[in-house]
Amino acid sequence: MPLHYQDCTFRYGRRTRPVLNGLDLEFAPGHTVLLGPNGAGKSTLLSLGAGALRPGSGRVGVGPLSASTRRDTRIYRRKVAWLPQRPGFLPGLTAREHVAYIGWLKGMRERDAWAAAPAAIDRIGLADKLNDRIKTLSGGQQQRVAIAGALVHEAELLLLDEPTVGLDPHQRRRFLDLLVSLRGTMHVIVSTHDIGDLDQAFDQVVVFESGRARFQGPVSLFDSYAAPDCAPGRRLESAYASLLEAAE
Ligand code: ADP
């Protein structure tokens, strides 16, 4: 169920320049990393994909479902999970209470959400923190609890906006391992500036710049844009730099 944008235009105010102008883009199934400079429109793209923003014209959808058609809203919300840059938590909730609450917000019955929360928290490796208050958890653990919220309502597509900001290298590694463990469970689109070793966690790359996809394809094709003399650990950074230079 890839996320797609058809002839999609979006602007933040009537007098502002459109961030997206007649965009046609279809994400491939699997795990996609969305790269691009600040201001390229990545957050806007994901917010539209989540149905949190509506396009001025055109269509945003997942399979046959439209993000902004009232008839599809309930099922769309259930199938698509979105974590903005700083996911909010209600103060004082435990990990289980938060995850059950997200399930309920996404349309599950209260008791079903409560019953399903422990398994979702177990999946993200925090079974021992089930009844801990979220504010006592580390930033990386909070990030994972937020992902458990998406697992509890069995979302089919997870949109993550800059999830590794503020994580230390160990937390970042655990986060990437978690993404790898979600392969086959859900499709994932992650926007990030943090290119490093992303080839292990992602199948596809989209480089977005000035409201357009400058590159879209498998990680192996993206890698082929790296400078021939670049160090082995720097290939993806090199590929990204060459693609952006080519677009200038
Ligand atoms: P990215 O995530 O790639 O950094 P964004 O989608 O956040 O890009 O921003 C794309 C453009 O939209 C930028 O020019 C940004 O200044 C503008 N923008 C983003 N959010 C708002 C907003 N709430 N109001 C007005 N302009 C915005």
Image: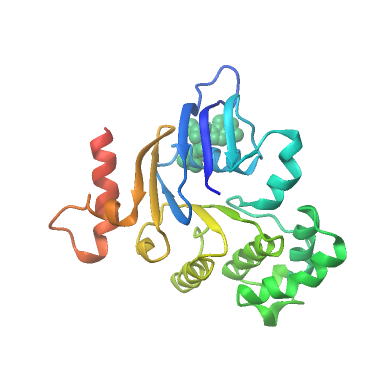
Q: Residue furthest bottom?
A: 128
Where, by quadrant of the figure, is residue 51 drawn? top right
3 is higher (above) or lower (below) than 247:
below
Q: Percent x, y for residue 209? A: 39, 36
Residue drawn at 49 percent across, 41 percent down: 42
Q: Which residue lies furthest to the left in this view?
A: 229
Residue drawn at 47 percent across, 40 percent down: 26
Q: Percent x, y for residue 3? A: 54, 44
Q: Percent x, y for residue 134? A: 71, 68
- 229 or 150, which is in the foreground? 150
Where, by quadrant of the figure, is residue 195 drawn? bottom left
165 is higher (above) or lower (below) than 173:
above
In which quadrant will I find the C terminus? top left
Residue 71 seen by the camera = yes
120 is higher (above) or lower (below) than 9:
below
In the displayed structure image, the side of residue 103 where residue 20 appears, left or right:
left
- Colour scheme employed for the rendering of this structure: rainbow
